[in-house]
Image (cartoon, rainbow, N blue to C red):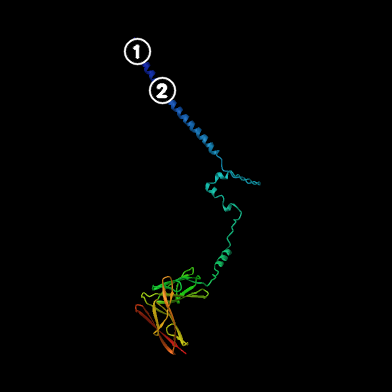
Amino acid sequence: MKIMPKYSNITKSAYILCSLILLLLATTACFSALDRVSLDNASSNSYVSKPMQNDAPKPTSASPTSTPQAPVPTILPDKISNHDVNLKPTIASSNKPMDINPTPTATVYDEVTSIAEPIKLTKILNVKGPEDNSSFSSDSIIIYGDSDPGSVITINDDPAQSKNDGGFYGEVDLEIGINTFTVKSTDVNNNHSSKVLNIFKTSPQSLFLSITQPLNQTTITSSYVQISGITSPNTKVYILGMPVGTQIEKLDGNNIVATFNHLVALSAGLNLIEIKVENEQNESLSKLISIIHVP
């Protein structure tokens, strides 16, 4: 019979359809189970985290008691910053007053007072140069020396340059022949000290004449006057036309002069006296002075 094959095909198709249905159901069941497990895990996690928040320790404050509590020194270093630690040793942390010893000002005033004492002057005047009776051919020289600090120095009443240490100097002009300079020192107490310096200037010519005394236009009561002077060596001297003797004198290492002294009689009133010198080359030089005699 040919019916068996036909029923056999139907049976196979039904079998396959049933298998697919079963597979679909199994798959659906698996996904359902996985969703349930995920929900259970989520529920379990939320359940655990919630008690942890509730169990977190809350800040507590010490309950006041009648018995004082000792401080715990190990807690403070953990909670203060490095800045606080560095500022810990401050003045406010100690009740001990600072030990301040200011320097007394009275001692300083005493020292200033002792410095301000007046300087004791020795009233000295030392002319260091040039030497007295020196000879020069220049038109000017510098007179220098030292005296008490703060003193006023004058040379022939002209102020000299002074230094803080007492030194002084001054330039003076020279004329041919003898030049007399008076150096005077006046200290802060108006004390005076003076020295006289004679400087001789040689003439650029070979002949010179200088009258040392008397001064021109001098008035005297004596009936005689002494005429003194210096001139070039190896010269002849004439006073009122009369020859006068000379003496050779050495001023310094390289300079020599001829000096003369002569006594002249005077008449009452004005007397004109001529002094003349002459050398071997017949060169001559003369000066005229006036002397007033009052009997």
- Quadrant holding the N terminus: top left
Instruction: Classify mark 2: residues with Cα within 10 Å, few (<14), some (14-19) or many (20+).
Output: few
Describe residue 25's horizontal placement relative to residue 74 as left or right.
left
The answer to which of 126 and 94 lies nearer the viewer is 126
Name the residue beneath numbered marker 1.
5
The answer to which of 137 and 83 lies nearer the viewer is 137
Of callouts 1 and 2, the N-terminal one: 1
Measured from the top left, where is residue 174 in percent x and y? 40, 75
The count of marks equals: 2
Measured from the top left, where is residue 158 in percent x and y? 44, 76
Mark 2 secondary-structure assignment: helix
Name the residue beneath numbered marker 2.
23
The answer to which of 256 and 44 lies nearer the viewer is 256
Q: CA distance from mark 1 to mark 2?
A: 27 Å
Name the residue at the top extreme: 1
Residue type at the position of mark 1: Pro
